[in-house]
Amino acid sequence: MNIFYIALNTIKRNLRDKKALLSSILMPILMIIILGTALNSRFQSTELDKLDICYLNLDSGTLGKEFERFLEDDEIKEILNVKVVTSIKEGEKLVNDKKAVSLLLVPQDYSEKLEAGKESAIKIYNTKYADFKNTIVENIVDAYNSAGNTIMAIAKLNSSNSLNYIRYKAVDENILSTEGNSPRGIDYYAVAMLVLAIMSSAGFAGDVISEDYFYDVSVRIKSTPIKSYERLLGKIIGCVFDIFIKAVIIIVFSKLVYKVNWGNNFGMIAIIVISAAVFSTVFGMFVAMVVGNGNKASGILNILNNVFTFGAGGYAVLLTRELGESVMMHLSPNFYPQAALFNVIYSNNYSVNIHFFSTFGYISMLWAAAVLLFIGFITVERRRVR
C-alpha cells in the first residue's frame, strides 16, 4: 500500500509543476508540427514527368513504320513526348539544347537487315545531362530491339508460315499507393518527438530519486517508517505512469489535431511506451546516482538525450543500408522504441535502415537495458550508503 501512495504522490507532484508539465508536453507537440511541415518534402514521392524525345525514321520499310506505331501506343505516350524531326542535325540540336532527352534514329536499312535475318537496332543519341532519364529511354528501345530481332529469327525458322504481329496485355496494372504504408513528415516526427519526450523524462526521474540521497530532505525521508525498497518502487512506478500519461496526451492531441497516423494497434503502442518509460526512468535514476547530484544529472541527461535523438534519426531522417552505420544507430536507446513503433504502425512495411530485431526484440532490449541499469543503480547506491 505504501508503494501505491508513493507512486500516486509522485504523479501528483509532477502534475502540479505546471511549468515542467507544459514544457514536457507542449515542446514535443510544437516540434511535431514544425519539423513535420518543414521537412515533409523528404517523405513525399515525386511523380516522374514525361520525357521529351525526338524521332527520325530513315527506313521506308514496314518495320520502320511498325516502330512509329509503337511510339504512338497509349502506354508509351504516358512516358514519352515524341517530336518528329527531319534530319539528324535537327535532332542533335534539340538534344544539345536540352529540349529533348534523346534522339531515336531508325537506320535506312533497318527493315532490310531484319528481313534478311541480320541483326539491326534503332540508334539512340542521348544527352549527357540526364543519366536516369537516358536509362528509361534506353530500356524502352532495347526492349523493342530485342523483340524485333526475336520475331525475325522466328520468322526465318518458320519461313513457310506467315507471322501475325499481335499485341497482348500481359500485365494487369495495379497502381500501388504508399498511403498508410509509409509515414508523411508529420507522422515520422510525431513518433520521433514522442520518443524524445519519453526519454527527456529521465531528468525528472533523476531529480525525484536525488531527494532520497543528496538533498537536505533526505534525512527526514529516511527517518520515516517506509522501507527503502517501497519508496524506490513507488517512485519508479510513479515516474513511469507520469510519462505514460504525457505520452497519451501527445498521441491523442497529434491524432485529433494533426491527423497523425498512429495505426490501430494501440495496445502494442502502449506496451512500447511503457517499456520506453521504464528504461527512461531507470536510466535517469542511474545517472543521478553515479553523478551524485540531481541538477548535474539533469544537465548530462539532456545532452545525452539530444545525442541519442540525433543518432536515432529523430531530428533528421538517416537513410542508410550500411551495416556499420546501422550498428551506430542501434547504439542509441531512442532507436529501439522508435523502430518498434514504426513496425507496429506500418505493419513492418516501413524501414529506411537495417533492423537487427523484430518489434518484440526491440521491446526486450529496452527491458534488458533497464534491468542492467537497475542493477548498476543498486550497486552504486550500496557503495554510497556505506
Image: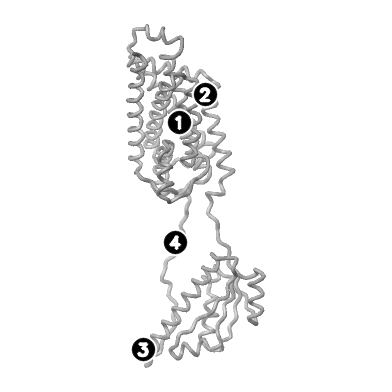
| Residue 196 point in image, percent of width and height | 48, 34
The residue tagged 4 is 174
Which quadrant, please, contains the C terminus? top left
| Labels 3 & 2 near each other (Cβ < 8 A) | no
**Mark 3 / mark 2, whichever is N-terminal:** 2
Crowding at dot 4, Cα within 10 Å, few <14 / some 14-19 / many 20+, comes out as: few
| Local crowd size for mark 2, using a 10 Å CA cut-off: few (<14), some (14–19), many (≥20) | some
Which structural element holds mark 1?
Answer: helix
Residue at the disc numbered 2: 21
Q: Does residue 12 show up?
A: yes
Q: Within 10 Å of the Cα at label 3, are there few (<14), some (14-19), or many (20+) other Cα atoms?
A: few
* 4 or 1: tag closer to the N-terminus: 4
Between marks 1 and 2 in the image, the one whose residue lies nearer the viewer: 1
Q: What residue type is labelled 2?
A: Leu
Query: SS of the residue at dot 2?
Result: helix
Which residue sits at x=54%, y=39%? 258
Amino acid at dot 1: Met
Q: Position of residue 51 (x, y in %)?
A: 58, 67
**Closer to the eye: label 3 or 4:** 3
Secondary structure type for disc 4: loop
Residue 84, by quadrant, is bottom right
Relative to 299, is 124 above or below?
below
Mark 4 or 1: the one toward you: 1
Classify residue 46 as left or right of residue 148: right
Residue annotated with mark 3: 157
- Give the distance between the C-alpha atoms of the residues marked 1 and 2, in whole angstroms: 15 Å
Q: Which amino acid does label 3 sit on?
A: Leu
Residue 58's spot in the image, x, y percent?
A: 58, 85
Query: Residue tagged by mark 1?
Result: 199
Is the residue under label 2 in contact with that under label 4 (CB below 8 Å)? no
